[in-house]
Image (cartoon, helix red, strand yellow):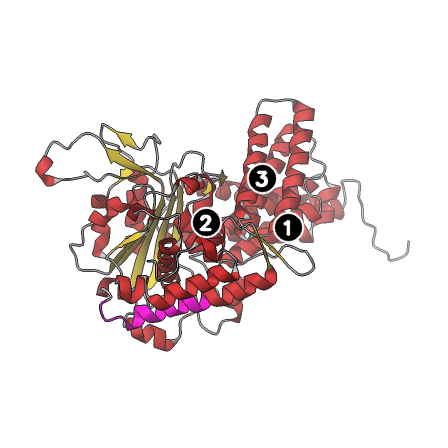
Amino acid sequence: MGDEEVTSVDGTGGASESNAAIVDEFRSLQQKSDQLFDDLRYLPQFGQKTWQPYFGKTFSVFTKLWKFQQEHGPALESCGALQKWDVGNIASRIGQLYYHFYLKTSKVTYLDEAFQFYSAITSRGYYKNADNKEMMVKKLRYYTRYIVVSLLLDKKGKLQELTQELSRVVKNYHEMYEIEDTKEWNSVITELKTFSAINCVVRIISDDGKLVHLNHRCTLTLNDSQRAIANSDLQLKEAVVIGGNYTGQVKFSDLTVDTFRFLQLLEYDANFCKRSKQNVTNPHKYILYKPTFNQISTYLSAGIQELPPDGVMLLYISAIGYIPTKKPLVEDLGLHLSGGVRTAGSSDKTKSTHEPHCVYPEDLLSATRRPLFVIIDSDNSTAFKNISDAFGQPLLVLMSPPMYPQAFQELGADGNLLTLFLYSPLEAICTICSITMVSHTTWVKCQEMLDRILGKLAQLCGSCQTLDFRIRQFTGDDLLLPLITKYLFCCGTLHLHQLFKEPNNYPSSFPEFPSKEITYHPSVLASILSLSSLLEVRSLFYELDIL
C-alpha cells in the first residue's frame, strides 16, 4: 500500500464518522425547518410587520437545508437518510413559502419562484415512486398547489397537462386504497376543469390556428402630465378582495372566478416590472373567501392601519345581496333599510331577521377616514349609494347593475359581468354579444380601438371641470385609473346594447360621473359602435340618433 491512506467504509473509519456527522446535521436542519414551517400557521394572518421576521427565519433555514442536501446528497443517500421523496417534500415546502411570500407581498416574482420549485419536483421525479398512503396524499396536495400557482400565472398549457396528471394520480390512489376521500379529489378535478373552461371566455385564433393567450396584468404606467392633471399623489397601497357566497359560482381552491380575475388587476406584469425604469410595486392585498363580518372588519382595519399618508385602501366585494324584510326597531333612523351584501352564511337574498355576515354601507363609515375606493359586484350593489361621506376624504364606489336582462341572468355562475368588464373589456363585450371565437388579426384591431377609447375616457376625466374632486383624486394612480375607465366603458357599452333597456341594467357610482361630459360622451359612444362593427355585431346596438 505504501504511503496511501486507507479509508474504512465498514462503520469504524473516518468516512463513516464523517457521514454520521452529515446525517446528524441534516436531521437537525430537517427538524428545525419542519418546526418553523408548522409554526407559521399560528402567526396572525393580517398585519405586515408581524410575519416578516418569522417568515425570513423559516426561509433562511429551508434555504440552508436545500443547499445542504444538494452538497451532501450522495452521502445522505448511501446512509439511507435521504430518499427522493424527502427532496420532494423540501422543494414542495419551499414552493409553499414562495407562494405565501406572494400572498403577503403581492410580488408576482415570488409566484415564478414557486412555479420553478414545483416544476422541478415533476421534472426530477421526486414523487414518482410514492408507495404509501401518506406519500400519495402529499403528492396530491402538491399537484393542487402547483395548479393554483399555474392558474395565477395564467399558464394555460401547463394547466391542461397538470389536470391530466392529477386525474391519473387520483385514479391510482383510488385503485391502491379504495378510500372515501377519493370522491373529494375527483371533485377537485371537476372544479379545475370547470374553472379552466370558464376562464377561456373567448377563443382567439392565430393565423396558424393556434390559441392566443392574453395577459391581464398591468403593463402601463401614467406619464407625468397625466399625474399632474389628477393633482394628487395618492397611490393604491392596500386592498381587501372578497369572494362571497354566490350560489354555484365556479371556484378552484379558495379562488372564485371573480376574485381570480380581479386580483390580477392589482398587479403589474412581472416582465414589465423588469423592463420598467420606474420602481413599480404592487399594492398589498388580502384575498378572502366567504369571510365572516368579523374577519372583514379585522382585515380592513389592518389594511387601513398599514396605509402610508399618501395611500389608498381598495375594497372589492363579489357577493350575493341581502335585503331585510323586517323593519328596524328605530324606524326613523333608517339604518340598514337598503340592506347590503352577504359574504358568508345563507345565500337567500331576503331574510326577516338581522344578518350577521352582511356588509352594510354603514359598516364602512370608519374606513372613509382614509381615501377609499370600493367596487361592489352584487345584485344589491346599489345599497352602497347610501354610503356616508362624513370625513371629506377621497371616496369612490363603483356598483354593478343590480339586475340583468333575462338572457344574461345566469352569468353569475361564470363570473359577474362588471368584474369581467374590469378584467377584460373585449371579452366582456364578446360575452354580451355571444361571440366565442375571434381571429387574432381582428382582436389586435379591436384592442387598438379599445385602447383609444380608454385613453379618451381618461382624457375626459382629466379635462372635465364638473368631475367630483373625490373621484379626481384617484385618477393619478396607475392601477386605479384603468379600473375607472373600464367601468365607464362598461357603462357606455351597456347603454348602447339593445337588450339592456331598464335603468337597473346599468352600473352606477357614488359620487356620480358627469353623464354627458364623460360617461355618455358622444365621441366615446361613437367609438364603441365602431368597435361593435369591427366585431360584426353592430346590429345588436342602438344608433346614436335613437338614444
Which residues fall within the magenta stretch? 451-466
**Label 2 – label 3 distance at C-alpha:** 23 Å
Task: Give the number of the mark in front: 2 or 1.
Answer: 2
Residue 368 relative to residue 419: left or right: left
Residue 35 relative to residue 75: left or right: left
Task: Give the number of the mark in front: 2 or 3.
Answer: 2
Question: Could you say which is closer to the camera, residue 133 or residue 324?
Answer: 324
Q: Name the residue under label 2.
A: 432
Q: What residue type is labelled 2?
A: Ile
Residue 292 image offset from top left, x and y in percent: 32, 37
Q: Residue placed at 68% from the left, 56% from the top?
A: 209
Secondary structure found at label 1: helix
Q: Which amino acid does label 3 sit on?
A: Lys
**Label 2 – label 1 distance at C-alpha:** 27 Å
Q: Which mark is residue 193?
A: 3
Compared to residue 25, the image places residue 492 above or below, namely: below
Q: Which amino acid does label 1 sit on?
A: Gly
Q: Name the residue under label 1.
A: 157
Which residue ends up furthest to the front in the rendered image?
A: 546
Q: In which quarter of the image is residue 342?
A: top left
Q: Is residue 21 visible to us here? A: no
Question: Could you say which is closer to the camera, residue 400 or residue 355?
Answer: 400
- Which of pointers 2 and 3 lies earlier in the amino acid sequence? 3
**Label 1 – label 3 distance at C-alpha:** 13 Å
Say if mark 1 contacts mark 3, CB within 8 Å. no
Secondary structure found at label 2: helix
Query: Does the magenta run of residues contain 182?
Result: no
